[in-house]
Amino acid sequence: MSTPLLSHEERWFASRLALSLKAGVPLLQALSLLQEEATEVNPALGAEVSAVRRRFEAGQPLKVALAESTRLSAPLLCVLCYAGEVSGRLGEAFARAEEYATRELEAWAGGEPNEVGNLQLWLRRAGLMLGGGVPLLQTLEVSVEGDVPERLREAVLFVGEAVRSGSTLSAALAEHVDVFPPTVRGMVRAGERSGTLDEVALQTAEHLHAGVPLPAAGKGSAKTTSVGEPAPDADGAGAWEAAIRRLDEMLLAALDAGATDLPLQPGRSESRARMRVDGVLRAAGVISSTDHLRYVNWLKARAGLALPRRAEPNRGAARLRLGQHDRRCRVSTYPTLYGEAVALRFHRAVDPAVEALEQPDALPPLGLRADQAAIVDLLLRQPNGILLVAGPAGSGRTTMLHCLARAVAGRGAAVFAVEEAVEAELPGIRQVKLEPELGLDIVNALRAANRQDPALLVLGVPPDEGAWPLVVEMANTGHYVMLPWQAQDAAAALLEATRAIGDPVLAAGTLVGATAQRLVRRPCPACAAERELTDLERDQVPAGHPLLQCPLTVESRGCEECGYSGTAGRYAIFETARVEGHVRRQMSGDSTGEALRLRLREAGVSSLRWEALLRVAAQQLTVTEALRATPADGAGTV
Ligand SMILES: [Zn+2]
């Protein structure tokens, strides 16, 4: 493989087109931009892009328009383009093509690839194509185009024939043990079973890249292996596979239990796995040091992290498809005294209460009282302005934002979301992922969004200093903007945002409201018992609160049903504030938090503490949890 699958020009084309498409620029317009840019530096290429654009404009699919060109017709590009057009994710497809080409060039930096290097490049090609949605047979065919060593090409084409006639990929690979070493076959088998062949191919390539000892292939033994019944591997690939099966079982158990995190911490002689359920860590198993290393390698490779980097913290993302679950997760690793620790954070809580919050038609979202829901509904019907969704980290702000965005999109309005990481796909909403290193920072993303003229713009991260003026301008020119804010309560959020905007009068006119929220743990009903509030607890209940008339709380000590945690899922409680009347006047002046809080209470907005204690009175929350999860009221009464 000494000639790249993509030329320099094709690489440039793929990366630029991916960037524009991801920023939300329509395809035809993106091609025009590319044509302009190319013409300046390379007129011949400019003419080529122009021809592609004209053919596309005349109604040809982009794939065909590219295939007919002379400079932009690499099979890899055309095939990924086809997959992108079919899946509607053209931007992603071109990004993949570019990513592959870059990795391929990197691989060559070390000189002509050897046999292992060639295998690695091939696996990477195949993984990217499969991941881009190219069918397996087509992948096998196209992945050996270009200057592929004869032995590898022949083996892959034979494998393609076997797959075409009904063999599994791993069984077909087993027919060519002189080309595909046992580790590769073992991992492909694991990938076939879990339905993650694309990721496994990339992961195996990474494995080879990292110089993990590759057992020599037993030449000549190929024909003794019957198709469909791969012989047990004597070299450790079988043990490897068994370890991954144990890891899968552990991950599945954690997902079934509704865990949000799964840290693996190495110790002196063995390592410890724990999982976080409803915010509490519990044991998830003890792992041998050998298995720990295998788990870390596997998870790192799945997350696209370089295996040899063990002395520094790393972060990546992976997708897990296990049992009923299909979840993205963040994978972080960090060095410890006894080796590398790894922590998984699963995106999207499986918590039924939180999941209910995500139902597109669930407005009011779960946990909003009817009067609060009416306020939120009113806030969502504003034609323009900024709504703040406040809370500390881990309070479910992103979930709330998505829920509100879906409610607005459900009414047929155009919704645009700009996010740091796309954790959940939202139907009917245009999602753009920020890529600062590619030049797609928040300001550029906002400009791209502005061109689409959405009714609602959802920001997944608070604007930085440079982006605020643009956000305020959009909010005052017919767009409605929602953004998350890290703050204790609605008053703090409104005041801090006012400071960020810089002009209190402008801020009071632009901010339409703020919600604040907390996730609280529901007491397990199976082991709940009633008790009276202690004097200390009673002192923390604000005067006039209904709980004081009957100062009882439930308490769950833990039982078999709740895994001795005393809790059964979580739900959210809210503070919902509209900016109007006295509240707006207070904000326009030089307000303190206390004064603004007082105005909100006068306007009938109850505090988070007040809300939580109402849940205690309704036996939906323990007083301990209510006092733990909410800030004390300065203003006291509603
Ligand atoms: Zn219980």
Image (cartoon, helix red, strand yellow):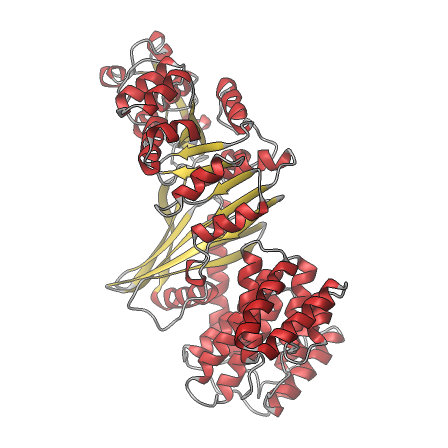
Q: Can residue 513 be seen from the camera position used here? A: no
The percent coordinates of residue 359 (x first, y second) are 58, 35
Q: Is residue 160 left or right of residue 581?
A: right
As drawn, 444 above or below 484: below
Percent across and percent down for residue 23 are: 53, 55
**Quadrant containing ligand 1:** top left
In the image, what residue occupies the spot 41% across and 16% down?
581
Which residue occupies the foreground of this view, 89 or 592? 592
Name which residue lies at 48% across and 48% down. 446
Residue closer to the observer: 457 or 203: 457
Along the horizontal axis of the image, is 77 left or right of 624? right
Q: Quadrant of residue 363?
A: top right
Please, is residue 294 above or below residue 357 in the view? below
In the picture, residue 524 is in which quadrant? top left
The quadrant of the image that shows the N terminus is bottom right
- Residue at 50 percent across and 17 percent down: it is 371
